[in-house]
Image: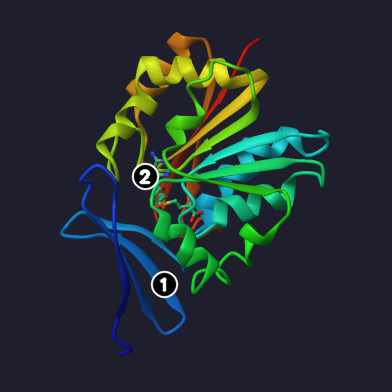
Amino acid sequence: MTPWIELDVAPIPNNGGELILSQRGNEFSISLKGKRGELMNSRVYHSEKQLSKLGCAYLRETDNAKVLIGGLGMGYTLASALNILKNSAEVTVAELVPEVVEWNQGPLGACAKYPLQDTRTQVHVGDVKDLLTSNEPTYDAILLDVDNGPRGLTHSDNNWLYSEEGLNSINDNLRPQGMLAVWSAGPDYLFSVRLKNIGFDVITHIVHSRGGKKGDEHSIFLARKTQ
Ligand SMILES: C[S@@+](CC[C@H](N)C(=O)[O-])C[C@H]1O[C@@H](n2cnc3c(N)ncnc32)[C@H](O)[C@@H]1O
């Protein structure tokens, strides 16, 4: 069996531990150092693509759509959003760990067919939270896949994103009828309730990690701004 080779290690800001990029043949993995598990694997990306397909479906015919993606990972969510959106769209992808952006400009680029090279893509190297505190209705869709679900895993500060305060800020940053979509490894009833209490219309979709109903079941929370 082909062994895994560690290609690089990157620190997560604010003493969050380390991310490891590994390769085995043409398979890549980004994992959290220690026993905290795998964040992304280049063979399993169906639900990451579904995050964009579901979150951006209503923008297919919209001119000048503005979309924010939290978490570049291996670029599947970004590539899938670009496939749906028109040429006039602008997609900002925020990535906390600078090395993840470099990995996508290097060995990981081919995984999702180089979405960083698309002229509609803008990269924010830093916390997605930085782009959510202006209280300006800026985005038509905000797609979040920065943890394993609505609680901080990669970065404990991410808990803010799923808190009442964070969700209110996200709501303020969405344009009228805008869509928040959140990837999660599993259901989270209390998160749905929190979204509804803020005023979002909420639907939870169950999607599979490998497509065609294969692999693990993941949840995508779709929260639509009501005004
Ligand atoms: C599970 S991966 C995303 C996978 C991605 N959806 C894809 O299609 O490959 C999570 C990514 O979010 C990044 N991340 C974690 N917290 C973040 C934050 N607060 N702001 C921006 N990026 C963050 C991690 O460094 C990692 O690259």
Q: Position of residue 84 (x, y in %)?
A: 73, 47
Instruction: Check residue 185 in the rendering and tell me which mark sits there, or answer none.
Output: 2
Callout 1: SS: strand
Instruction: Check residue 220 in the rendering and tell me which mark sits there, or answer none.
Output: none
Q: Position of residue 175 (x, y in %)?
A: 66, 19
Residue sitting nearer the eye, 222 or 32 = 32
Left or right of residue 180: residue 89? right
Q: Amino acid at mark 2?
A: Ala
Query: How far separated are the C-alphas under marks 1 and 2?
Result: 20 Å
Q: Residue at x 35, y 43 (%)?
A: 147
Find the residue positioned furthest to the left: 34
- Which quarter of the image is occupied by the N terminus? bottom left
Residue sitting nearer the eye, 80 or 218 = 80
Which residue in the structure is indicated by mark 1? 28
Q: Position of residue 121 (x, y in %)?
A: 66, 49
Residue sitting nearer the eye, 93 or 178 = 93
Q: Residue at x 64, y 59 (%)?
A: 115
The answer to whether the beta carbon of the residue marked 1 is less than 8 Å from any atom of ligand 1 is no
Q: Nearer the viewer, mark 1 or mark 2?
A: 1
Vertical arrangement, residue 102 with respect to residue 187, above or below: below
Left or right of residue 99: residue 61? right
For the image shown, how many numbered marks are present on the structure? 2
Callout 2: SS: loop
Answer with mark 1 or mark 2, whichever residue precedes in sequence.
1
Q: Amino acid at mark 1?
A: Phe
